[in-house]
Each structure stands twice: as structure tokens, then as C-alpha cells.
């Protein structure tokens, strides 16, 4: 009978965090292109307390970071035992590559957001994505 091999917990946590952060940054870049940017929080010309686009972007980035970390950790735990069908793995890899390619295309275009606001929004998205990806991966590892 073959032994079950497990990935080390730190490797799963690290890979899940990286995946969650990359997906959160990709969603941030794609959202900024369509007017959902965190940079609206630092604009002085906004008449609202918190612009709706900034709030939606905040929740979208947090949700994608958490989900990316959670699902990556879950998939890495179940991939070793062969519980994920080969077609599902290929589909998920293709979706991830297309999302990151779209974010790369958006990042190469000129930004509609002022530079300082764009840098602050990017750093906020990075930190938010990292925290939420860690939380998602941590919950997935505790559950499994």
C-alpha cells in the first residue's frame, strides 16, 4: 500500500499567500481600469464621505485575496492524494493565467489615477490581499 505524502504546512501557507496576493493585485488593477479604485479614499475632490467605488474595490480585493488563499491551500492539500481531477486542475491553471495576463495588460496601459494616489492604492491592495490570503490559507489548513 502506498504512503500518503503531504506538503509541509509552511509550503502550503506560503504558496496560498502568494496566490491570494497575486489574484488580489490582479483584481485591483482590473478594477482600477473600470473605475473601482482604492485611490478614491485619498482624493480631496470627492464630495462623499467614502466613494462607493472605493468601498466596492476594498471588499472585492479582500474577497478575492481570502478566496484565493483558501482555495489554493485546499487544493494543495487535496492534490497530493489525487482527489482533484486532471481537467479541473488544467481549467483552474488556465483561469489563473488568463487573469494574471489581463492584469499585466491593464498594468502596462497609462493609469487614469494620479501617481501618489495610485502608489498608495497599490500598497493598500497589497497589504489587504496579503492579510486576507493569510487568513484564508490559515482557515483552510485548520479545517483540513
Image (cartoon, rainbow, N blue to C red):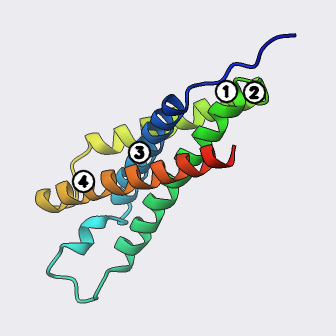
Using the image, determine if residue 82 lies above or below residue 60: above
Residue for point 18% across, 54% down: 119
Q: Residues within 10 Å of mark 4 (few under 14, many from 20)?
A: some
| Count of marks placed on residues | 4
- Give the mark, 2 or 3, whose residue is nearer the N terminus: 3
Real-space Cα separation, disc 2 to disc 3, in angstroms? 25 Å
State yes or no: discs 4 and 3 in contact (Cβ < 8 Å): no
As helix, strand or loop, the secondary structure at mark 3 comes to helix
- Give the mark, 2 or 4, whose residue is nearer the N terminus: 2
- Give the mark, 1 or 3, whose residue is nearer the N terminus: 3
* Residue 25 at x, y percent in the picture: 37, 48
Report the residue marked by disc 2. 87
The tag on residue 90 is 1
Report the residue marked by disc 4. 123
* Residue 62 at x, y percent in the picture: 45, 60
Real-space Cα separation, disc 4 to disc 1, in angstroms? 31 Å
Report the residue marked by disc 3. 21
Task: Point out the image quarter for the N terminus.
Answer: top right
Q: Is residue 139 visible?
A: yes
Residue for point 41% across, 45% down: 21
Amino acid at each position: 500500500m502506498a504512503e500518503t505524502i503531504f506538503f509541509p504546512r509552511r509550503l502550503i501557507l506560503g504558496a496560498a499567500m502568494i496566490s491570494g496576493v497575486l489574484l488580489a493585485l490582479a483584481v485591483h488593477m482590473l478594477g482600477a481600469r473600470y473605475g473601482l479604485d482604492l485611490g478614491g479614499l485619498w482624493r480631496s475632490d470627492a464630495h462623499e464621505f467614502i466613494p462607493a467605488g472605493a468601498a466596492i474595490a476594498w471588499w472585492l480585493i479582500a474577497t478575492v485575496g481570502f478566496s484565493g488563499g483558501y482555495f489554493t491551500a485546499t487544493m494543495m492539500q487535496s492534490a497530493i492524494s489525487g482527489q482533484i481531477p486532471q481537467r479541473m486542475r488544467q481549467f483552474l491553471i488556465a483561469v489563473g493565467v488568463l487573469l494574471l495576463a489581463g492584469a499585466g495588460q491593464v498594468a502596462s496601459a497609462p493609469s487614469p489615477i494620479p501617481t501618489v494616489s495610485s502608489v498608495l492604492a497599490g500598497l493598500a491592495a497589497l497589504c489587504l490581499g496579503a492579510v486576507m490570503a493569510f487568513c484564508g490559507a490559515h482557515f483552510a489548513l485548520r479545517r483540513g
